[in-house]
Image (spheres, coloured by chain):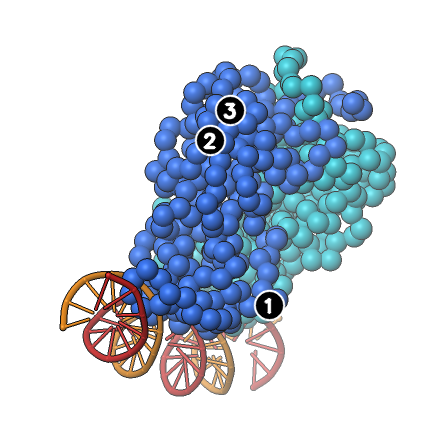
Chain colours: A cyan, B blue, C orange, D red
Amino acid sequence: MTTLTLPPQAAQVGLAVDVAAFAMHGGELRVLLVQRGTLPHAQTWALPGGFVHEGEELHDAALRELREETTINLEPRHLEQFFTFGAVQRDPRGRIVSVAHMAVLPHGTVRVTSGGNTIGADWFPAHTPPPLAFDHADILTRALNRLRTRLEYAHLALEFLPETFTLPELQEVHEAILNRKLDKRNFRKRLLAQGVLLASGERRNGVGRPAQLYRRAKGVRVPTNL
Amino acid sequence: MTTLTLPPQAAQVGLAVDVAAFAMHGGELRVLLVQRGTLPHAQTWALPGGFVHEGEELHDAALRELREETTINLEPRHLEQFFTFGAVQRDPRGRIVSVAHMAVLPHGTVRVTSGGNTIGADWFPAHTPPPLAFDHADILTRALNRLRTRLEYAHLALEFLPETFTLPELQEVHEAILNRKLDKRNFRKRLLAQGVLLASGERRNGVGRPAQLYRRAKGVRVPTNL
DNA sequence: CCAAAAGTGTTAACTTTACACCCATGT
DNA sequence: ACATGGGTGTAAAGTTAACACTTTTGG
């Protein structure tokens, strides 16, 4: 471990990352939480997160924590830093600054099991989470705001879905994130006008008329920065 | 100095803040830079910044660095964290993570003199800065983006001006930030429709027809978060 | 009376919203 | 044949963008 010589008055801080990871489950937006196994806040649910390692990029630390603490079987489709929480008293162990990230996991049977210092991991309704450790409720609120903002510009909703999907499914994602209903005709008009969707074959659902399948048009990318 | 016990693999990092502080000078958007007096990057221009102190909030650290390094005679009207730069190799001294802030200083003869470890301080055109130390050019680019975004929602342009101002002055601020010309009539229509401006007396300029003076309407606040 | 900057409205294009019925399939 | 969910168009309201002349002052 290399030693960094800091000026005498510089604070010694712990640098952590926390991740608000979202996915769709049963037509609802869910957030991934872990149940803490150690003090402080043992038993309490929290966002997955932990300390950044030696020589490790922030982005990579966020990915690692997501994997270590939850054993996710899917890669995040989007991972983005959105705010740094550094209030002096936010952690009773001392000064710990957390670079908070927002992640989107693709559709699919996302299974989670606990790992690391956690005694559980599960998905919870993103808009109505259980009580959370530390300032994680604030972090989650801000993550939801960022997710909503990104929905407009970027085509982030597509990241929640498998490679091919139907327009009703895509609308469901938008509605779950915005937490309100959208008009079906206007939604379709808008999305198709953007030219980011490409029609393919048909799909037969269980019931009702089969929906047209779409995939993202070639060359459509989610902007990494803003 | 209290000691924080970190897990063995946790990185030891320095935590810093950097501030991109903007003001209007002569119809142009300028950014405040300091000339470094010490290695690395001695002589090079950089954003004001430095290490966070023991028990100091990030916001306060940003304010302090602004004051220490430049001796500004005005309080920032807006100060907002916008991104955290943590690339492993961004600073040759070791792992230093910087929480970058964007600040707006009000109009007026903003005088700066160097202080602390700097050998100079001055204002530079924000869209065409000199070569900058570390990754400060990236930080500045992102700060400008954030400033533009805030212009839409918030009434951040008002923070660049004195308490009373004219519509042409306000338009000048918008144009300087967006780096393009705006239509005078549409600009006025839009701003007045928002109901954030209140007319007061008249002002006589050097030349031409005197402009109406405005002040911000009571109860109009810049949202601190988003 | 001239130079300089402030102030003022209208129209066309575009965008957004509201709204109701028919269609294709499985059972 | 019926239940289920998918698919389609139009009109009104609102927003944005383009555009040129008159007014008020100082010199």
Q: Do the residues under discs 3 and 2 have CB atoms within 8 angstroms?
A: yes
Three-letter amino acid code at disc 2? Answer: Ala
- Which numbered disc, 1 or 3, marks the residue that appears first in the sequence? 3
Spot occupied by residue B102 in the image (x, y as percentages of width and height): 53, 43
Of residues C7 and A222, the one drawn nearer to the viewer in this rendering: C7
Name the residue that disc number 1 marks.
B218
Spot occupied by residue C3 in the image (x, y as percentages of width and height): 18, 62
> In screen coordinates, is B87 left or right of B145?
right
Relative to B138, residue A219 above or below: below
Secondary element at tag 1: loop
Relative to B94, residue A186 above or below: below
Spot occupied by residue B43 in the image (x, y as percentages of width and height): 43, 20
Name the residue that disc number 3 marks.
B118
Relative to A51, residue A31 above or below: below
Q: Residues within 10 Å of mark 1 (few under 14, many from 20)?
A: few
What is the spatial separation of the Cα atoms under label 1 and label 3, in whole angstroms? 40 Å
Name the residue that disc number 2 marks.
B121
Residue B177 in sight from this viewpoint: yes
> In screen coordinates, is A88 left or right of B16?
right
Read off the chain for label 2: B
Q: Residues within 10 Å of mark 3 (few under 14, many from 20)?
A: many
Marks 3 and 2 on same chain: yes
Residue B136: image tag = none
At a point 55% along the width and 44% down the height, the residue shown is: B74
At a point 62% along the width and 63% down the height, the residue shown is: A179
Of residues A76 and A100, the one drawn nearer to the viewer in this rendering: A100
Read off the chain for label 1: B
